[in-house]
């Protein structure tokens, strides 16, 4: 049982068991606690046992043991009375009399854990069920026979996501991030609601350094890797030693294809099928989108593969492919694509021109095949090809399909694989482009050894120069063409990439530079490469784009989650990492929840760092002077960094009364939108303000719209107040409220509807009105007490309440909405 006595998600079961001895019918009662192994049945029983003993009841606890007999387990407590001699009827009578003597007129509880493992469970437990006796049997599976005898049946369900989060908060002091939640659900499958499996898996992650606390959240590093599971977790799924499960972990197949692995195993197809049916009924097997039977827990499947060993796995996969080829030759209805998958599933090199190679080349030519599947077929064909020209064409196609499929982390492995075979010189451009794409999307630079092998006549290909500049935070376009050009006087063109051309690299750089927010390389690649490119969700550019979308859309929680993903992806020192930290600091400043100067853990835009560091509300004269001095020392501020910093400094200067400084800053602005904002702030220009508001509104940029409304004059302050409230930007909300009062305008009343509050805030309001403490709220919402305290502070600011009691009163009176009718 947890050290603090909390058993998450089992409150109702524990309460029912604790009440049961005081509510016994005249003849006693049998309570059945059902749930799969690892769901916490034993923990619930132990907690209930503590209560029963404290209430003065006698408690006996038994397990069937290796003999599989409850009568046998009872002999430890009842002696020879439980000996099974003279038939079950006489044994039952002796046991009943012994139980009566043992109880001695006081309540007695008999706990039979794992009761379903006993062959005599129903008879033995019925014998023990006497007046004044509560029998509690715990079992896995359905337990139909015991359920038919039971007076109380309590089914222990999987933990809900909220209960699982509260459990992890208790164990680690931080609630899980959304990415960890998603990884547990996807990796553990049906075990994701099993407390033992979750805690064991997180312990393994922690030991491997993959469980990291960031921003008060428990996060998963390297989510692309399988979740590590222990033998105990694999056992919890059930049937870990079943040969059918092992076969399907290695080779997932469709039900119609079970005859082939059955033949390899030397068993009848019907026997193999019945075993698979039983595993599916138990939830151990499931069918994927392709209709293939596979282990319902990918993490357990990966564990089974590690247990078998790579050589055994490769051997099984090759044997299945060979058997399916033979079955196809003999007229079996083997679908060609499924057979191609089997051939691609093992690394083998049969004789050139063999049947497998012919099939692969036919499949590759199919027009309706997904790029990921085609990439696997091409790789398998490339491994078998001997003609140099064919190998070059196949290698180029392999890289191209990986790019289309969004398997950009696999591109790096493909580059190393092809380089190891001594590729033709004309492949250099494609390999360099693939290495660049893998580096940018994983956040890990191209290895020096790989870079050296990709040099062309001692010079750096354009794609590798792009990658170098990207990691250094330098503009990617200048020098790209010259970096790839042959020295004057040398004959012949330099090998050009068909994967990403030099011209396209320049266009990608220009596209990113034209964006309002820097660093959105996913959108730049999409705009230039079109359907040839798919950005994988787990990549660094995709995570950073989610930061921007959450920030501009006003969903700061989603933006913070994505920022944590960025932090745990790649080397941690790229310009994209630094930009994500900038937006995280800005959100902290806006909401009043912290936000120090962004950590300079990579190439930084000093103007953007200064912008986020000074905050959006106001600065004292000394702090303003310090920021201005720092700005003056920036040798060549970026266009977008200056476009954010200068208008903010001008606004802060106006608010602090430094009008001359504000005017000087206005003269320095060259970005069109930044100049509109600065004119509105410094000169009170209504036309400029209206244009700035329209621009921010057109691109649905909530923080930018709030900034524009704040400088647009008194007519826009009410809307600014509403946006600040919706964003949870308490400092800005307070500033706008003060501005409204200065103009003699009323501050909008707190909303009685739920529109202004997020679902989390609505739940918090309900719990505050119910008198819950910050710790209780934190457990329910998987947040630390400190984070709950920050939420409560923002709620007080947004509602205009001065205390927690006043806020609770407002909720109960209906003046503050919680989303409840």
Image (cartoon, helix red, strand yellow):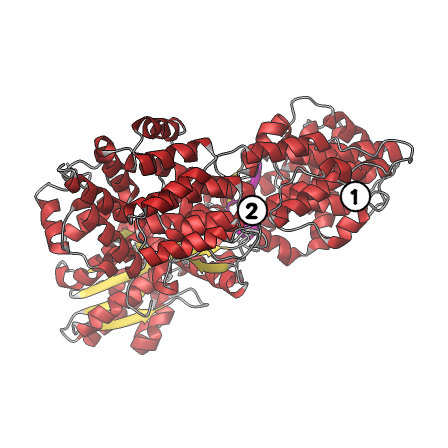
Classify mark 1: helix, strand or loop: helix
Q: Is residue 338 visible?
A: no
Q: Nearer the viewer, mark 1 or mark 2?
A: 2
Q: Residue 669 lies in what quarter of the image?
A: top left
Question: Residue under circle 2?
Answer: 636
Is 296 one of the magenta-colored residues? Answer: yes
Question: Residue under circle 1?
Answer: 418
Asked whether, in this view, residue 348 is left or right of residue 283, the answer is: right
Name the residue rendered at 32%, 70% in the picture: 3
Q: Position of residue 409 (x, y in %)?
A: 64, 44
Magenta residues span: 291-301
Asked whether, in this view, residue 770 is left or right of residue 426, the answer is: left
The foreground one among 93 and 100 is 100
Q: Residue 133 lies in what quarter of the image?
A: bottom left
Q: Position of residue 101 (x, y in %)?
A: 19, 75
Position of the C terminus, as image quadrant, is top left
The foreground one among 767 and 751 is 751
Q: Position of residue 138 (x, y in %)?
A: 33, 59
């Amino acid at each position: 049982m947890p050290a603090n006595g909390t058993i998450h998600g089992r409150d109702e079961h524990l309460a029912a068991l604790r009440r049961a001895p005081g509510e016994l019918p005249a003849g006693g009662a049998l309570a059945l606690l059902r749930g799969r192994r690892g769901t916490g049945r034993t923990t619930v029983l132990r907690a209930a046992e503590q209560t029963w003993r404290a209430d003065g009841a006698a408690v006996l606890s038994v397990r069937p043991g290796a003999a599989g007999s409850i009568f046998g387990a009872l002999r430890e407590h009842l002696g020879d009375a439980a000996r099974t001699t003279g038939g079950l009827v006489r044994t039952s009578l002796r046991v009943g009399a012994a139980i009566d003597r043992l109880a001695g007129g006081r309540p007695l509880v008999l706990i039979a854990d794992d009761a379903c493992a006993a062959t005599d469970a129903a008879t033995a437990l019925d014998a023990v069920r006497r007046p004044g006796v509560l029998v509690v049997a715990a079992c896995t599976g359905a337990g139909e026979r015991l359920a038919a005898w039971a007076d109380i049946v309590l089914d222990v369900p999987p933990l809900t996501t909220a209960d699982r989060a509260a459990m992890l908060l208790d164990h680690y002091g931080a609630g899980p991030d959304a990415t960890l939640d998603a990884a547990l659900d996807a990796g553990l499958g049906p075990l994701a609601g099993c407390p033992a499996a979750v805690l064991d898996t997180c312990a393994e992650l922690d030991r491997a350094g993959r469980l990291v606390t960031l921003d008060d959240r428990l996060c998963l590093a390297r989510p692309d890797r399988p979740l590590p599971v222990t033998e105990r977790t694999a056992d919890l799924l059930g049937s870990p030693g079943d040969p059918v499960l092992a076969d399907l972990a290695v080779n997932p197949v469709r039900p119609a294809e079970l005859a082939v692995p059955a033949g390899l195993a030397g068993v009848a197809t019907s026997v193999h099928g019945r075993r698979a049916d039983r595993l599916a009924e138990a939830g151990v097997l499931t069918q994927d989108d392709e209709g293939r039977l596979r282990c319902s827990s990918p993490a357990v499947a990966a564990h089974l593969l590690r247990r078998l060993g790579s050589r055994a796995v490769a051997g099984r996969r090759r044997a299945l492919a060979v058997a399916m080829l033979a079955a196809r030759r003999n007229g079996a209805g083997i679908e060609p694509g499924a057979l191609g998958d089997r051939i691609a599933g093992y690394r083998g090199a049969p004789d050139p021109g063999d049947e497998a190679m012919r099939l692969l080349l036919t499949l590759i030519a199919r027009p309706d095949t997904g790029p990921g599947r085609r990439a696997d077929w091409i790789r398998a064909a490339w491994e078998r090809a001997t003609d140099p020209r064919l190998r070059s064409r196949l290698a180029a196609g392999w890289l191209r399909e990986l790019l289309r499929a969004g398997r950009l982390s696999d591109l790096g492995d493909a580059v190393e694989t092809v380089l190891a075979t001594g590729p033709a010189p004309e492949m250099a451009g494609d390999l360099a482009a693939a290495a660049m794409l893998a580096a940018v999307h994983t956040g890990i630079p191209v290895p020096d050894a790989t870079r050296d092998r990709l040099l062309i006549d001692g010079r750096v290909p354009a794609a590798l120069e792009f990658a170098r500049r990207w990691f250094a935070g330098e503009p990617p376009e200048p020098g790209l063409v010259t970096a790839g050009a042959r020295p004057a006087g040398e004959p012949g063109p330099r090998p050009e990439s068909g994967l990403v051309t030099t011209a396209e690299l320049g266009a990608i750089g220009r596209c990113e530079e034209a964006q309002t927010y820097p660093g959105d390389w996913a959108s730049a690649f999409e705009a230039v490469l079109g359907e040839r490119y798919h950005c994988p969700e787990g990549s660094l550019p995709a995570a950073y784009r989610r930061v921007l979308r959450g920030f501009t859309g006003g969903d700061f929680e989603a933006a913070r989650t994505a920022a944590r993903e960025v932090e745990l992806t790649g080397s941690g020192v790229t310009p994209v990492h630094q930009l994500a930290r900038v937006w995280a600091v800005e959100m902290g400043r806006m909401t009043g929840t912290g936000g120090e100067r962004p950590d300079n853990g990579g190439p930084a835009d000093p103007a953007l760092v200064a912008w986020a560091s000074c905050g959006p509300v106001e600065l004292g004269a000394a702090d303003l002077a310090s920021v201005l001095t720092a700005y003056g020392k920036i040798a060549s501020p970026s266009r977008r960094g200056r476009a954010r910093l200068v208008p903010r400094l001008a606004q802060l200067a106006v608010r602090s009364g430094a009008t001359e400084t504000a005017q000087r800053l206005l003269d320095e602005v060259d970005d069109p939108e930044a100049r509109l904002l600065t004119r509105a702030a410094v000169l009170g220009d209504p036309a400029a303000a209206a244009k700035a508001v329209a621009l921010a509104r057109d691109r649905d940029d909530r923080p930018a719209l709030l900034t524009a409304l704040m400088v647009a004059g008194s007519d826009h302050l009410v809307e600014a107040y509403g946006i600040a409230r919706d964003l949870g930007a308490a400092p800005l909300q307070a500033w706008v409220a003060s501005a409204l009062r200065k103009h003699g305008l009323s501050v909008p009343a707190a909303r009685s509807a739920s529109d202004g509050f997020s679902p989390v805030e609505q739940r918090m309001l309900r719990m505050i009105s119910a008198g819950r403490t910050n710790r209780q709220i934190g457990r329910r919402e998987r947040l630390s007490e400190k984070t709950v305290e920050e939420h409560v502070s923002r709620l007080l600011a947004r509602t205009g309440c001065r205390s927690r009691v006043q806020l609770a009163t407002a909720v109960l009176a209906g003046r503050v909405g919680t989303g409840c009718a």
